[in-house]
Image (cartoon, grey):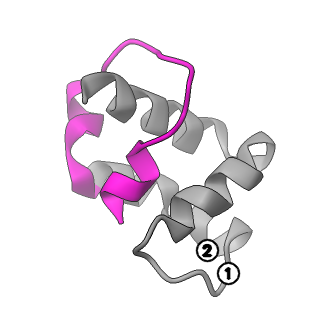
Amino acid sequence: MIRLLAAGLLIVLPAAPLLAQPAALQAVCAKDATALCPGVKPGGGRILACFKQKSDQLSAGCRSALLQARALR
């Protein structure tokens, strides 16, 4: 699930070592996944696809974490 959340966003922010850890990223975006993508099962790019469709609704913390994780890849 973490790889799915971290991939696919275009804007790059400065990297934060803490957010490079999968558990930290999952914790930051868990509420977004639950609120914005109810019933979407992890795997196969489904969470990422949901986040892409609703990118304007992501919390600032989740959006930032995803962008930072992508920058570290």
Question: Residue 38 sits in which quadrant?
Answer: bottom right
Can you say whether 40 is above or below 67 in the image?
below
* Drawn side of residue 63 relative to residue 72, left or right: right
Relative to 58, say whether 18 is above or below.
Answer: above
- Disc 2 and disc 1 in contact, CB within 8 angstroms: yes
Residue 41 spot, x, y in % from top left: 50, 83
Q: Which residues are magenta?
A: 1-23
Q: Residues within 10 Å of mark 1 (few under 14, many from 20)?
A: few
Q: Residue at x 50, y 55 (%)?
A: 29
Q: Nearer the viewer, residue 64 or 8?
A: 8
Quadrant location of the N terminus in the rendered image: bottom left
Q: Which residue is mark 2?
A: 34
Q: Secondary structure at mark 1?
A: loop
Q: Is residue 57 left or right of residue 34?
A: right
Of the pair 35 and 46, the residue shown nearer to us: 46
The C terminus sits in image quarter:
top left
Give the residue pinned by disc 1: 38
Could you tell whether 5 is left or right of 37 in the image?
A: left
